[in-house]
Each structure stands twice: as structure tokens, then as C-alpha cells.
Image (cartoon, rainbow, N blue to C red):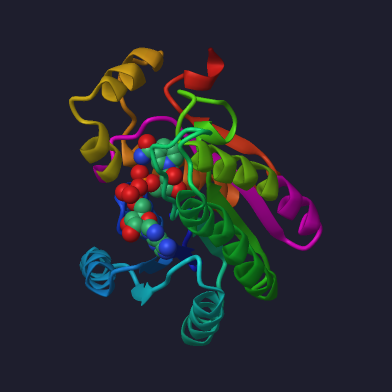
Amino acid sequence: MRLTGKVALVTGATGGIGAATARRFAAEGATVVVTDLDEDRCAALAEELRELGAVAEPRVLDVSDEEAWRRVVAEVAAALGGIHVLVNNAGIGRFTTVESETLETWNEVEAVTQRGVWLGMKHTGPAIEAAGGGAIVNVCSIFGTVGGFGSSFSYHAAKGAVRVMTKNAALHWAQRGVRVNSVHPGFIASGTLLERTSGTPRERAMLEGTPMRRLGRPDEVAGAIAFLAGADSTFMTGSELYVDGGWTAQ
Ligand SMILES: NC(=O)c1ccc[n+]([C@@H]2O[C@H](COP(=O)([O-])OP(=O)(O)OC[C@H]3O[C@@H](n4cnc5c(N)ncnc54)[C@H](O)[C@@H]3O)[C@@H](O)[C@H]2O)c1
């Protein structure tokens, strides 16, 4: 119960890693603000968490929309008494290369995967400080650090930005009680990744390239997020935690 008494907002919370994080946070005693694009899916997950005995609030939040951030942070602070934890989990990618990337795909990916993380930190950080301190966990990727397969170009650009924005924001808030760290998953068996790669050469390359020779599970990422969100990591800020079956050790 590492998050008892904490209010935690998770973005992209109805996807694979987001839902596992919301469930883990609920099990750790947090009040969970379940945010994503689809109202019904947010409501269903919040209901599931309530049935497990947690306090949970659904909110529609498009992370690329600054006005939506303003509204949701104000509503949550008023309704739940503050925010202590933010998980910037929403992210999208496109199978592009440096040559095939278009301005349209670049802007699409940047808006969610990079801008969304900045807006989340910008609008939630002050609320976390006002509530007496807490933690921001940015869900980055091994692709924020290494070049991967030489594809998903804009995704790499956005995740690289997330990795360094994390460190910059960590320094900004270092003496003000807001810790900021990043989690870097390798290949995780979440719905979208499986749908897009199942049976393709990419799936084989992911498995063969991962020293543990398996995909990770969303709950294995959620465990690392819960660690960085809670009281077991209070001297950690600006750090990056890899959950990748050994990929970046190579
Ligand atoms: N699955 C992997 O292998 C893997 C690896 C490394 C990093 N990640 C990162 O983990 C995070 C979660 O990934 P996942 O595998 O659970 O993906 P997912 O596709 O299952 O979930 C992503 C969620 O983000 C939501 N979303 C999309 N655009 C949004 C927007 N504008 N505003 C708010 N929410 C939005 C989607 O509705 C979805 O519920 C992402 O940032 C992803 O880049 C995933």
C-alpha cells in the first residue's frame, strides 16, 4: 500500500500499460484518476477499480490539448483535494522512416507523445507542489535512447525528447518536492503492439533482439512506475529505469 492517501492521474489509462498502472495504483491504495480519449472506456475502468474497493474518477483528457489539461487538473484538485502523482503514459507511434515521415505523421506523433508529456508536467507539476510534493513518471521507451530498427522516426524523436525533458524538469523542481523520472519499456505485450506486429517479421525481430527472448507484460512496467511514484524512490529524480528484458544492456 505504497500510495495510500495519494491522488494519481494516469493518461492513456485504458491502454495496455495505462490500465495495468491504474490497477496497480488502486491495489497500492491510491485514488486513481483514469484519463483517456474515450469516455465509456474510462468509465468502465474506473468502475472496475471501484469494485476492487479503490476510489477512482474517470475523465476524458486529450493530452495534446492544453485547455483540457487546465480543466482536468482544476477539476481534480477541487474534487479530490489535490494531485500527488502524474503518469504521462499516453503515446502513439507510426511505422515511418527518416525518409517516409511526412509533416502530417510527424505532427501527429509529436502532439501526443512529446507535447502531451510537456503539457502534463506544466499543468500538473504546480498542483503536485501545492499538494505538498509527489512524483511525475514519464513513460518513455528504449526508443528514446537507442535507434532501434531505424524506423518509427518521429516516435524516436518524441521519446528522445521525453527522456531529456524528464531530466530538465527534474532539475527545475529538485528542491520543491516534485520528482520526475522516466520508465523505458522494451517490447511489451499490450493490445496495440500485438495487433500491429503479430505474425510479422517485426515480431520475430523483437523477440530475437530481446535477451530474455520474450515480450514484457504491462504489469511488469506498472511495477516500475509504482516504484518511481511512491515512497521507495524518494532520492531519485531525473533518472531513467529500463524495463526491457535486457535490450539496452547489449
Ligand atoms: N507496448 C510497448 O511495447 C511499449 C514500449 C515502449 C514504450 N511504450 C509506451 O508506453 C505507453 C503506453 O503504451 P501501450 O503499449 O499501453 O499503448 P496502448 O496503445 O495500448 O495505449 C495507449 C493509450 O493512449 C491513449 N491515447 C492515444 N492518444 C491519446 C491522446 N491524444 N490523449 C490521451 N490519450 C491518448 C490511447 O487511447 C490508449 O488507450 C506509450 O507512451 C508507449 O509509447 C510502449
Q: Position of residue 249 (x, y in %)?
A: 55, 16
Q: Position of residue 113 (x, y in %)?
A: 50, 52
Residue 27 in view of the camera: no
Q: How many discs appear? A: 0
Residues 37 and 242: in front is 37
Residue 92 in the magenta stretch? The answer is no
Q: Is residue 195 left or right of residue 112?
A: left
User: For the point 69% across and 60% down, which residue is it?
Assistant: 178
Residue 32 in view of the camera: yes
Residue 169 in the magenta stretch? The answer is yes
Q: Position of residue 87 (x, y in %)?
A: 50, 57
Q: Quadrant of the N terminus?
A: bottom left
Q: Is residue 121 above or below residue 79?
A: above
Outermost residue, left side: 199
Q: Is residue 75 left or right of residue 28?
A: right
User: For the point 69% across and 43% down, which residue is it?
Assistant: 164
Q: Position of residue 170 (x, y in %)?
A: 73, 51
Residues 176 and 65: in front is 65
Quarter occupied by residue 198? top left
User: For the point 26% across and 70% down, which residue is it?
Assistant: 50
User: For the point 51% across and 72% down, which residue is it?
Assistant: 65
Q: Is residue 54 left or right of residue 175?
A: left
Q: Is residue 192 above or below residue 177?
A: above
Q: Which residues are magenta?
A: 167-191
Q: Is residue 233 left or right of residue 244?
A: right
Q: Is residue 149 above or below residue 155?
A: above
Residues 173 and 31: in front is 173
